[in-house]
Amino acid sequence: MSDIPFFALFLAVPLAIVFATRRIAIAGKVGAIVLCYAAGLLLGLSGLLPDAADGPRTTLSEVSLAFALPLLLFSVDLRAWGRIAGKATASMFCAVVAVSFVATLLFFWLQTRGVTDAEQFSAMAVGMYTGGVANLAAMKVALTIPDDRFLLFATVDTVVGGVYLLFMLTIAKSVFSYVLPPFDESTSSKSDAAPTLADGSGGAVLGPALLVLVFAGVCVGLALALAPSFRFAQFEIAVIVLLTTFGLIASLIPWIRANTFSEPIGMFLIYAFTFSVAASLDLSALVGADLTIVLFVIMATVGTVLIHAVFCSLMRVDVETFIVTSVAALLSPAFVPMIVERLRNPALLMSGISVGILGFAIGNYLGISLALILAR
């Protein structure tokens, strides 16, 4: 079967949702990101997608994210980022301490449940919740974790992570606002609505839109070409670092930063990424899973988020910075644009990606070190 219908589906649904948010009041209030995630979940859980859709879905999610990152960074105001970077770094430090503390406690709980080599699960939790899947894979190799154990953890985490992301996209800000201060809007150019592709007509739209797409394509091409030369970092990490770097360099060019079409195009690609990722969730993967490991992942996720929030409250980190850095740590920088759009706070984009990359950098060292300490 041709992949074209699947590509069309994964693009058409987000496009329809964007139009709906601009014409239907209630859809506009809910937001395109939440609707794309919900639509993807419904599609994935319905069982209607055939296995043949997995390839196009994965390809589209990877390509859309690769182009979206530089497009969104083209309009970043580095001066605004500099004013809030300290809070984001402090929040990431809190997240790292929180996951290390929770993983250590859960290690002893696993031992009481008779789980052998329990430090492997603690290491996977630390790696996953500081750098994402790339660091999780590194834990497997470094600690020679058996395939079945690794796959079980990854599968359960995919489902729990999906629920966590839905929570962060919907009610997290309202919940954590009770213990965390509001974001200081004087430090950013916070906006309530992104520009739209409807601004202008004909060539007035096509020319600038194609121009930023070409520049984004150059960034993607350079990142993919240069990433293998970074032998000290995993390929995925190197690509994100390079895309971020090239996007920021381009943002220093005034006429690129002033292009009003880079952000709406980038956000549409994030909508497509969101829909595609959500469509991959499969709750049936939990059927037959070891209940102890399911509880471990749930407690590791919930415990990390709650303790992270407590630490941020003590350090007076605002609620929006907390949410962005939490997602950057527990999921990866790839999900930061999604959260930033939901919060309508573009000033946090660079901070979220930066601390996510920091998590990539320290996650392997931290996870392996914790495993070696606990094993003794």
Image (cartoon, rainbow, N blue to C red):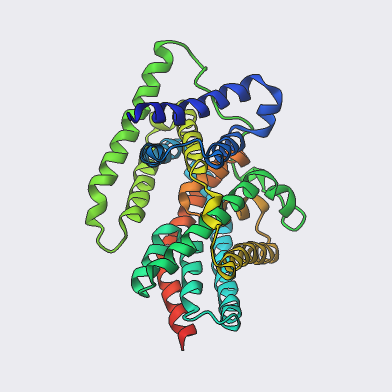
**Location of residue 281 with respect to 36 vertically, above or below:** below
- What x and y, as percent, mark residue 103? 56, 73
Work out which quarter of the rendered image holds the N terminus and state it: top left
In which quarter of the view is residue 190 placed?
Answer: top right
- What x and y, as percent, mark residue 225? 23, 46
Q: Is 280 displayed left or right of 250 in the figure?
A: right
**Location of residue 20 with respect to 240 vertically, above or below:** above
- What x and y, as percent, mark residue 317? 65, 58
**Location of residue 176 with respect to 62 vertically, above or below:** below
In which quarter of the view is residue 11 placed?
Answer: top left
Q: How many marks?
A: 0
Residue 174 appears in the picture as rendered: yes
For image coordinates 37% across by 28% down, the residue present is 212
Q: Residue furthest right?
A: 178
- What x and y, as percent, mark residue 276? 47, 39
Residue 362 appears in the picture as rendered: no
Q: Residue furthest top?
A: 202
Q: Is 357 displayed left or right of 339 in the figure?
A: left
Residue closest to the eye, 145 or 355 = 145
Q: Residue furthest front?
A: 288
Residue closest to the eye, 265 or 77 = 265
